[in-house]
Image: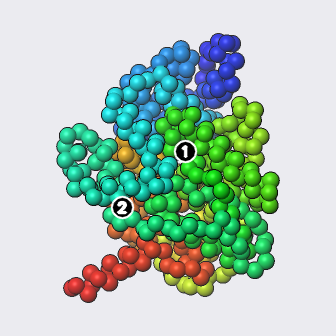
Amino acid sequence: MQTSFSLTQLADPRTAEADKILRACVHCGFCTATCPTYVLLGDELDSPRGRIYLIKDMLENERAATADVVKHIDRCLSCLACMTTCPSGVHYMHLVDHGRAHIEKTYRRPLLDRALRAMLAKVIPSRPLFRVALSAANAVRWCAPLLERIGLKPLAAMLRLAPARLPPRRKDRPRVVPPHGQRRARVALLSGCAGDVLTPEINEAAIRVLTRHGVEVVLAKGEGCCGSLVHHMGREREALAQARANIDAWLLEIEGEGLDAILVTASGCGTTVKDYGFMLRTEAAYAGKAARVSGLARDICEYLATLELDAPVAHPGAVVAYHAACSLQHGQKVIRAPAELLVQAGFAVRDVPEGHLCCGSAGTYNMLQPQLAGRLRDRKIANITKVAPDVIAAGNVGCITQIAAGTAIPVVHPVELIDWATGGPAPPALQRARDHLRAASSDD
Ligand code: SF4
Ligand code: SF4
């Protein structure tokens, strides 16, 4: 694609990067076929190619974003299916991140939208605030239809997404969890924010599997939200502050006792931590440190695949539908490792038809774009149901919450199943589903 940025514009390294990305696009349109919003809406402006043109126009002409442009960019899930499909290697992720930051700087959203986004950006990254918000949402869940009727659809979606029961507040974990037997590696595990409130059992399972296999696990002091939530809203300043805080926390460990890897159980967060090096590349004080952290970042299943895991001690034999989270398959290109680990652990794994299409979770998308997110979830669940699973496995807490809100089939993280098969407890979601079935059959 031809571009016409001026030399002055290209002196800005961010514009120079956008120029490089735009020039790689040959407008072939292959990406449209796998873009969920194009598949649903059939509008070129809701396709990757259409959005690339919109972003190009804004940046080249230094034009403020218009309501129409914002509408189409907001509808993008950042699922990155387009990056997997693109034959020219167009880095859509970096381009749309830049486009979103430009929107945030040049466009004043309507009051309600602004308030909603500010609230999400403040509440979700804070574990205590998020916990209070979920409890409050549960108490007023009955308001959801009313909110929907008066046009407050995002608020209605938030109430509906809040799980009916919150897991008990997790006990403080020790900062360092020693391995069983001889130490073969030392890793940091990202506790994160929302995931540790919604599904603390995932990190618990990861710690058990790792320590059982001789890996010492460190929960670095000062780490928290990875920043992806605000990053995808275009709130760059907040995202970079959160990234720097994590980098500082992990650097202390890297330069102290050392780290072999930084592990993340939520693939959405993992994609962002792997991108810290790019996000902070122009900051002299952080560029090197950020690149070091990104170089050590691994998804939990990606890392487990490098260890020789013990043979399964339990033989649950369940049929697992493996839902490949977009951030894992398209963002990190971790494709086969989770399913292969599950097969090794003794599960019968089924791939889900249309596995390249997003479930509609996408960070805050399911709250900010509830209609499209709902359509994508229904489609995903219909596809999952075709393989008649006992349980669904997904490597991202966002997908787990999104899919679980629309089906009675238990949804868990692959690491919970691996933990179960190699000597840990059954995943709580599976246990709850079994108790429910038992109670229902004793009522008959
Ligand atoms: S597939 Fe790649 S090169 Fe083709 S239009 Fe899409 S982004 Fe551009
Ligand atoms: S990131 Fe996903 S929704 Fe956005 S343009 Fe690419 S394929 Fe479409």
Which residue is denoted by mark 1 in the rendering? Answer: 228
In this rendering, is residue 125 above or below 57? below
Task: State the SS at label 2.
Answer: loop
The amino acid sitting under disc 2 is Pro
Q: Which amino acid type is shown beneath numbered disc 1?
A: Ser
Examine the rendered structure and indicate whether residue 305 appears above or below residue 374.
below
Q: Position of residue 324 (x, y in %)?
A: 52, 58
- Residue at 36%, 61% in the rendered image: 163
**Identity of the residue drawn at 43% across and 23% down:** 107
Q: Earlier in the sequence, mark 2 or mark 1?
A: 2
Residue 168 pos. (x, y %):
43, 69
* Near-viewer residue (410 or 199): 199
Q: Name the quarter where the N terminus is drawn.
A: top right
> What is the number of the mark on residue 163?
2
Q: Which picture quadrant has residue 134?
A: bottom left
Q: Secondary structure at mark 1?
A: helix
Residue for point 71% across, 43% down: 290
Residue 95 appearing in the image:
yes
